[in-house]
Image (cartoon, rainbow, N blue to C red):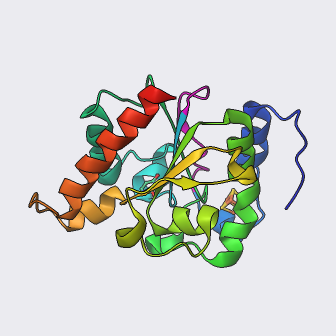
């Protein structure tokens, strides 16, 4: 991995990322989607990759899944305006919203790592399998490991990590049944709020 040193500010990293052509996704993107929310947050959420609306607006989680994510945070009094820093594993939209390829994730990791190094959040939410794999490797599928706390070690400066369902998965599994994906997400966000208050 590229050593970016310690004197990079978030603005410097962002500027470099905006001009990035390290992988093929630069050829089809309309905008680089770097981040949203507040940079001195103790809570960071890492999603997968920009979709159509994110690519058009240059902002993460603004489409349907993003609106659901905002409601999930709001249910425990959290918001990206006040409390959360939001970014993605990969900063440019993959065509047709396909999963980012391994070489694209690897090329983009330097920006995610720089974001983690600069923000140094105490809690990192890994939203969906793509984010889980990038930070935890093969820890298991999301349905098995969601809602559990993991110690991330050096790469995340000792932050507590929790894998959570991706909101687009919840949109596809829209039952509120006890034990279903939405119900589980509401358990997880309450646990996250508790940890947030204790750190
Ligand atoms: N899904 C993601 O993972 N990230 C976004 O920014 C939007 C949808
Ligand atoms: Fe660069 Fe990441 Fe965009 Fe690829 S996805 S061009 S590595 S910013």
Residue at point 48% right, 75% down?
A: 140
Inspect this view and state whether residue 63 appears: yes
| Residue at 28% across, 42% down | 72
What type of secondary structure mainly makes up the magenta span? loop
Where is the N terminus found, in terms of image quarters? bottom right
Which residue is more in the foreground, 197 or 18?
197
Q: Quadrant of residue 52?
A: bottom left
Q: Is residue 182 above or below residue 15?
A: below
Q: Nearer the viewer, residue 105 or 175?
A: 175
Q: Is residue 28 visible?
A: no
The residue stretch that appears in magenta: 30-42
Image point 24% across, 56% down: which residue?
Answer: 184
Query: Magenta stretch containing residue 39, yes or no?
Result: yes
The residue located at (68%, 70%) in the rendering is 104
Q: Is 120 covered by the magenta stretch?
A: no
Establish if 57 lies above or below 104.
above
Closest to the observer, 146 or 35: 146
């Amino acid at each position: 991995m590229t050593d970016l040193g310690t004197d990079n500010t978030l603005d410097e990293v962002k500027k470099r990322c905006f001009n990035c052509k390290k992988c093929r996704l630069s050829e089809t993107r309309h905008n680089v989607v770097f981040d949203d929310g507040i940079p001195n947050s103790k809570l960071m959420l890492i999603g997968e990759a920009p979709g159509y609306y994110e690519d058009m607006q240059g902002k993460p989680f603004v489409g349907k899944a993003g609106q659901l994510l905002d409601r999930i945070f709001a249910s425990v009094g959290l918001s990206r305006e006040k409390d959360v820093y939001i970014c993605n594993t990969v900063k440019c939209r993959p065509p047709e919203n396909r999963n980012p390829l391994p070489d694209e994730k690897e090329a983009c990791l330097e920006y995610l790592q720089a974001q983690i190094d600069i923000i140094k959040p105490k809690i990192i939410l890994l939203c969906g399998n793509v984010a889980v794999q990038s930070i935890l490797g093969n820890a298991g599928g999301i349905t098995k490991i969601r809602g559990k706390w993991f110690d991330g070690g050096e790469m995340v400066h000792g932050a507590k990590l929790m894998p959570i369902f991706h909101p687009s998965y919840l949109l596809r599994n829209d039952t509120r049944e006890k034990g279903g994906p939405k119900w589980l997400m509401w358990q997880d966000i309450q646990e996250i709020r508790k940890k947030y208050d204790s750190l």
